[in-house]
Image (spheres, coloured by chain):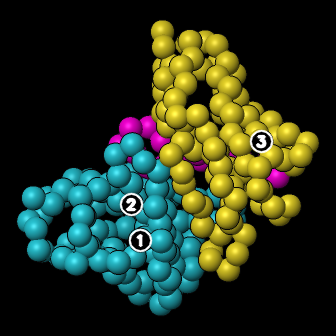
Amino acid sequence: DAKTTQPTSMDCAEGRAANLPCNHSTISGNEYVYWYRQIHSQGPQYIIHGLKNNETNEMASLIITEDRKSSTLILPHATLRDTAVYYCIVRVASNAGNMLTFGGGTRLMVKP
Amino acid sequence: DGGITQSPKYLFRKEGQNVTLSCEQNLNHDAMYWYRQDPGQGLRLIYYSQIVNDFQKGDIAEGYSVSREKKESFPLTVTSAQKNPTAFYLCASKLGNEQFFGPGTRLTVL
């Protein structure tokens, strides 16, 4: 499995863009980058995923570098409800049911 | 509404007792998973099942057991052999590229 490296914590002002980086330098060509977030004591929530191209949905944008060794999750206008732990995950493509392996994540604190 | 339910939300047990955590989904997903989360840490995979009547050990299966008799249900039993069972337990199911998580059960062993 490709490992990911994320900062332990970040702060962001309410209304500003939150840019969360992730390094995945050992990613394989057929592995996707996934982002989940977990608000305290709740189950993780899917945010977005991508392979090579940048992706955007109603929650966030995902920017993947051309060499695919890193990516950035962008929350364009962070709100207090976006305070959570954000997990960057590289999907394992194997017979093991494509399970996701979670690391420590980045604790994002959105401040008023 | 479609989704994944886990019950109970909070569970207390005495040391040495087995306890079973419920996970039900009505999403018609084939694959289901159990994860454990300890404070300040990421999720670790306990067991997973890709189809009915089949399941595989994850990274930390020791002291746990599961069954998958029905597609909708994937109960997890925490046995007395689990050395440190107090944790937050999350169940998930998967369709395509996306995993859907339940609300979790917080187990405290006294």
Task: Relative to B110, say whether A87 is above or below.
Answer: above
Q: Residue placed farthest to the top in the image?
A: A112
The picture places residue A63, in percent across and down from the top left corner, at: 80, 36
Q: Residue B60: horizontal and vertical position, in percent?
A: 41, 71
| Chain of the residue under the numbered disc 3 shown in the image | A
Classify mark 2: helix, strand or loop: strand
Q: For the residues tagged 2 and 3, is the chain the same?
A: no
The quadrant where residue A21 appears:
top right
- Residue A70 - label: 3
Viewer-proximal residue among B101 and A50: A50
Residue A37 magenta? yes
Q: Which residues are magenta?
A: A36-51
Q: Tag 1, which secondary structure? A: loop
Q: Chain of mark 1?
A: B
Please indicate whether residue B53 sits to the left or right of residue A47 in the image.
Answer: left
- Which residue is label 1 attached to? B60
Label 2 sits on what residue type? Answer: Arg
Residue at mark 2 to residue at mark 3: CA–CA distance: 27 Å
**Disc assigned to residue B36:** 2
Tell me what residue is drawn at x 86 percent, y 61 percent. A29
Q: Which chain is yellow?
A: A
Q: Is residue A107 left or right of residue B81?
A: right
Which image quarter: residue A59? top right
Frontmost of labels 1 and 2 is 1
Mark 3 near mark 1, Cβ–Cβ under 8 Å? Answer: no
Q: Chain of mark 2?
A: B
Question: Do the residues under discs 1 and 2 have CB atoms within 8 angstroms?
Answer: yes
Numbered circle sitting on residue A112 = none
If the image is split into quadrants, where does the C terminus of chain B sit? bottom left
